[in-house]
Structure formats: structure tokens, C-alpha cells
Amino acid sequence: MRPVALIHAGAGGRSREIEERQHEYRSALLTTLAKARAILESRGSAVDAVQAAVMFMEDEVDFFNAGRGSALCADGSVEMSAALMRGSDRQAGAVARVTRTRYPIAGARAVLDGPHVLLVGDAADHHAAAAGAEQRDPAYFTTERQQHRLATEPSRFERGTVGAVCLDVDGLLVAGTSTGGMRGQLAGRIGDSPQIGAGTWADENVAVSCTGDGEAFIRTGAARQLAAFVAGGTPVENAANGVLREVAALGAVGGLIALDARGNTALPFVAEAMPRGLWRGGSEPEVWA
Ligand code: ASP
């Protein structure tokens, strides 16, 4: 099986900052792909590849809305969420409203093989810590850049949620998504990213990670619906476009990445932009910023 890695860095408006720092931005996307590639090329698992790619983006402060540098809630707090799902057995792990776990996707990984699917708040942080996931003081996640944005454009859609889907040499499909949510959201709001079937999904046929107005992805059951289309024989690209049409019909902006068991990909978006990248075993990585 030829391994594949697909990543996204959030659907939304074009940002002047990213236009001005194109070179750095593209290089961050290429490094993200390289993290997944290194694992997949050495016959590693798609679970590890997705986690490594997402962790790199969570650690990148300026460009992505995940981990440190996440968008701020209306009260100035940072509440992060992440999910990870393994297609072969549909085991899923997710965390929401974490405030201390340095890499929220590692918090999701700590839930993946246990009896639960989604842990919330302090309990999710404690669970992650007990599994060895690095913890930081909540202040660590707040950046001046995001404080300035909240002060000047309090409810503007924040681009930069991150996601990855991978297929490994054994044919395993895995999806992961991580976010700080929407800038100016009410503290306590949980979007689609950590909700299995809404923003994140993987089964034996397809792996999906979504981004955009989370409420619309929840209300359309977007990721799970895409998988149902694929299971029924619809090509992944048509399935992805069909789901996004429903999201757009609710007046929402968004995008997604989807990868099927044969390595077919879809990366559609209904937004000004959705930075994304693709690597296939035996080929050079490609990124679109
Ligand atoms: N979907 C995320 C949320 O609703 C935000 C995003 O993708 O930008 O929290």
C-alpha cells in the first residue's frame, strides 16, 4: 500500500499576514507533511503520523489556531479541543475545553484506546497528564497576537484550525483535528472538531477532518455523512462536495480533507482559502497556501 498524508490548516478568509509571510507559511506546511512522511515511510502507523503532524501545527504559534496561539474566547480564555479516530476498529478519542494540555491531540490519543470517546475540561487535562501528556499553565497558551485580535476584531472567524488524515502501508486510515475554536466564542462552546462524526471521522473506507463554522458541520453530521456516501459507492470527491453543499446551504463557510482506502483524496472548501498539503509515497509533497 502506498502511504498518503493530507493536511489542512483551516478554512476562512485570506489573511494579509499569511500573504506577507508566504515563504514561512509554506515551509510550516511542508514541515508538517514531513513529520507524517517520516513515520509513514518507515512503515509506522497512521495514528502516529496524524498525531505527529497535528502536534507540529499545535506548537506553531503564529500561523495556526491550535495549541499555543489558539483563538481566544470572548472572556479572553483559551479552550482547546482535539479528536483522533482510527478507521480499522472505529476507536475514537477526543478532548474538549482543555486548558493545560500542551498538545491537545496527545490528550485525544490518551482517550483513544480507553472505554470513553470524549472527555471535557479539567478531567480531560488530568487524564492526559496521567497518560504522560505534557501540561502547561493556562497562560502559556495565550499570545499577544490573539489578545490584539480579540480586542480589534472580536468575533471574526479565526482561520487556522488544523487537521490531518493518513493512510499507512498496512492500509490503516486515521483522522485527527485540533482547534482553539472560533474567536470570541462563549467560553464553554464546543465546536465540531472534537465531535466524532461532525468534524472528525475515520472508518475502513475513509478518513475525514473538517474545518469552518463548526455549528454547521454539527448540524449536517458532516464527516459521518461523507463516510456514509463513500460506503454506498459514491467517489470520495463527490461525497465531499455533496457534504460541503449542505454546509454552505446553512450559510456557513468551511472545508474538509478526505482520504479513501485506495488513496483517493478530496480537499474542497467553500471559503476564500484553505491552506492544505498532500504527500503520497514515491512523490514529492505539495502544499497550497
Ligand atoms: N470548526 C472549528 C470550530 O467550530 C473552527 C475552524 O475550523 O476554524 O470550532
Image (spheres, rainbow, N blue to C red):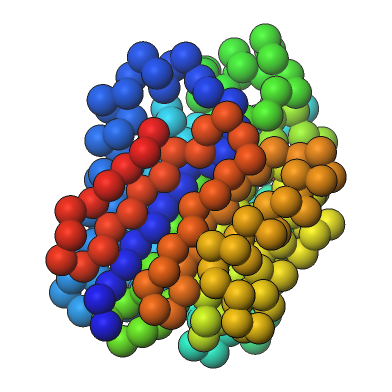
Percent position (x, y) of residue 135? 48, 52
Looking at the rendered image, the quarter that the N terminus falls into is bottom left
Tell me where residue 263 sits by quadrant: bottom left
Task: Give the vertical position of 118 relative to 62 (above or below).
Answer: below
At horizontal 32% and vertical 43% (from top left) the residue drawn is: 287
Identify which residue, 49 or 4, lies in the foreground.
Answer: 4
Q: In this view, does 185 lie to the left or right of 30?
A: right
At horizontal 52% and vertical 33% (from top left) the residue drawn is: 273
Task: Give the vertical position of 81 relative to 225 (above or below).
Answer: above
Outermost residue on the bottom side: it is 89
Looking at the rendered image, the quarter that the C terminus falls into is top left
Identify which residue, 275 or 100, lies in the foreground.
Answer: 275
How many numbered circles are shown? Answer: 0
Q: Is residue 156 left or right of residue 38?
A: right
Percent position (x, y) of residue 96? 67, 56
**Does residue 126 appear in this view?**
no
Percent position (x, y) of residue 163? 49, 53
Percent position (x, y) of residue 21? 33, 19
**Does residue 41 appear in this view?**
yes
At horizontal 58% and vertical 44% (from top left) the residue drawn is: 269
Task: Give the vertical position of 28 relative to 127 (above or below).
Answer: above
At horizontal 41% and vertical 22% (from top left) the residue drawn is: 18
Task: Give the vertical position of 86 relative to 226 (above or below).
Answer: below
Identify which residue, 276 or 72, lies in the foreground.
Answer: 276
